[in-house]
Image: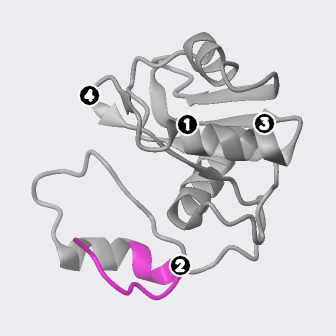
Amino acid sequence: QDEEEKEAVAAAAAAAGGSIAPLETCPTKLIINYLPQDATEQKLRDLFTQVAELESCKLVVNKQTGNSYGFAFVNYHTHEDALKAIERFNGEPIGNKNMKVSFARPQSDAIKGANLYIRNLPADADEAKLRGIFEKWGSIIQTK
């Protein structure tokens, strides 16, 4: 796996457990989920700087297509600004989706038991096939 893939996996894990409470989170770094595929980093930056100046903004994209994977990170200078952004943008429509904005958790091996969401599965992918593929990495509680 390259670094971007590792970041994407870690972000998916963080997204599964992100919350408004800053416990075990980065107090200024937010994860934004449910972004449309055509989202751009500049549009995201323009949107979130309506709250306050950003320290950084990173839209995670597919290197080959340039399309958004549907999530991004923004980092504010203060915890208060990050809270304002959550209050302002969490649940806000963007394209045909509603954004989920929450505190990002730091990358860590300590993130365990997170949900894993997999898209674009073949039509014949059933629970037995999924379990066969993924059980070697840990217990599967539920598939849908």
**Are the two marked residues, 3 and 2, in contact with CB atoms closer than 8 angstroms?**
no
Please provide percent x and percent y for residue 75: 78, 36
Residue indicated by mark 3: 75
* Residue nearest the viewer, comparing 133 with 65: 65
Res 97 seen here: yes
Q: In which quadrant will I find the C terminus?
A: bottom left
Q: Residue 110 at what x, y percent from top left? A: 75, 77
Q: Is residue 13 magenta?
A: no
Q: Secondary structure at mark 2?
A: helix
Indicate which label's residue lies in the foreground, 4 or 1: 1
Image depth: mark 3 or mark 2 in front: 3
Which is more N-terminal, label 2 or label 3? 3
Residue under numbered circle 4 = 96
Decide which of tag 1 and tag 2 comes sooner along the chain: 1
**From the viewer's perspective, is residue 121 above or below residue 67?**
below
Amino acid at pointer 3: Asn
Determine whether label 3 and label 4 are within 8 Å by CB. no
- Residue interval drawn in magenta: 134-144
**Residue at image x 73%, y 42%?**
82
Q: Amino acid at mark 4?
A: Asn
Q: Nearer the viewer, residue 117 or 21?
A: 21
Residue labelled with disc 2: 137
Q: Give the spatial CA distance, label 1 vs label 3.
A: 15 Å
Side of 17 where 74 appears, left or right: right
Find out whether the residues at labels 1 and 3 contact each other: C-beta distance under 8 Å. Answer: no
